[in-house]
Amino acid sequence: MTTQITKGIKISVTTSFEGTFFKNYKTHYAFGYTITIENQSKDSVQLTSRHWKIYDSLNELEILDGEGVIGKKPVIKPGESHTYSSGCLLTSTIGAMKGHYNMVNFENNEKFRVYIPTFKFSTPFTLN
């Protein structure tokens, strides 16, 4: 598990290899990840958007921006958490992701970033 805390918001990430399949005449490797966003601060916050950098050892860096996470913009009260699962496709057996969430503090309307630590993907059959 990979973790990081920014302004009292703890991000924890676990990853999994989901398998291989063919798409557009190429082998692709499917990876899953589960992220828990835990509010350890004293204020309620809302996740409004996300920014991802996806590294694939055989491709150029891919940058993705979007609203919320998996169609939601969760409000997380102090002491509570929000967990979701998603995934990504790589053309290689090794890769990584990192990024940040854009958040709003409901107590003072401050907008801030919560950083998502770099988490790695590798297939079980990849030699290190």
Image (cartoon, rainbow, N blue to C red):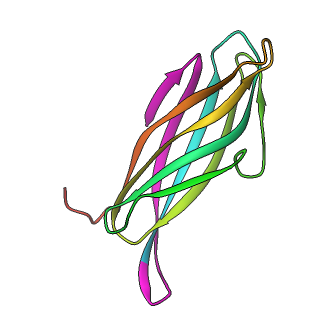
Question: Residue at horizontal 53%, vertical 48%?
Answer: 52
Hey, which quadrant is residue 119 in on the image? top left
The residue sitting at 20% across, 61% down in the picture is 127
Relative to 95, 32 lies left or right: right
| Left or right: 65 in relation to 56 | right
Looking at the picture, does residue 38 appear above or below residue 53? Answer: above
| Residue that protrudes farthest toward the bottom in the picture | 25
Residue at 31% of width from left, 63% of height from top?
Answer: 57
Q: Is residue 31 left or right of residue 75?
A: left
State the quadrant of the C terminus: bottom left
- x 63%, y 16%: residue: 40
Whole-percent x and y of residue 110? 72, 18
Rendered location of residue 19, percent (x, y):
46, 70
Residue 28 appears left or right of 81 = left
Residue 92 found in image quarter: bottom left
Q: Nearer the viewer, residue 77 or 62?
A: 62
Percent across and percent down for residue 79 are 70, 17
Q: How many marks?
A: 0
Find residue 106 and report its horizontal and vertical position in percent. Answer: 80, 18
Q: Does the magenta stretch include residue 16?
A: yes
104 up-or-down from 98: above or below: above
Residue 105 higher or lower than 22, as above or below: above
Give the overall secondary structure of the magenta segment.
strand
Q: In this view, does 122 lie above or below 37?
A: below
Towards the viewer: 70 or 124 = 70
Q: Where does the N terminus fall, quadrant-wise? A: top left
- Span of residues in magenta: 1-27
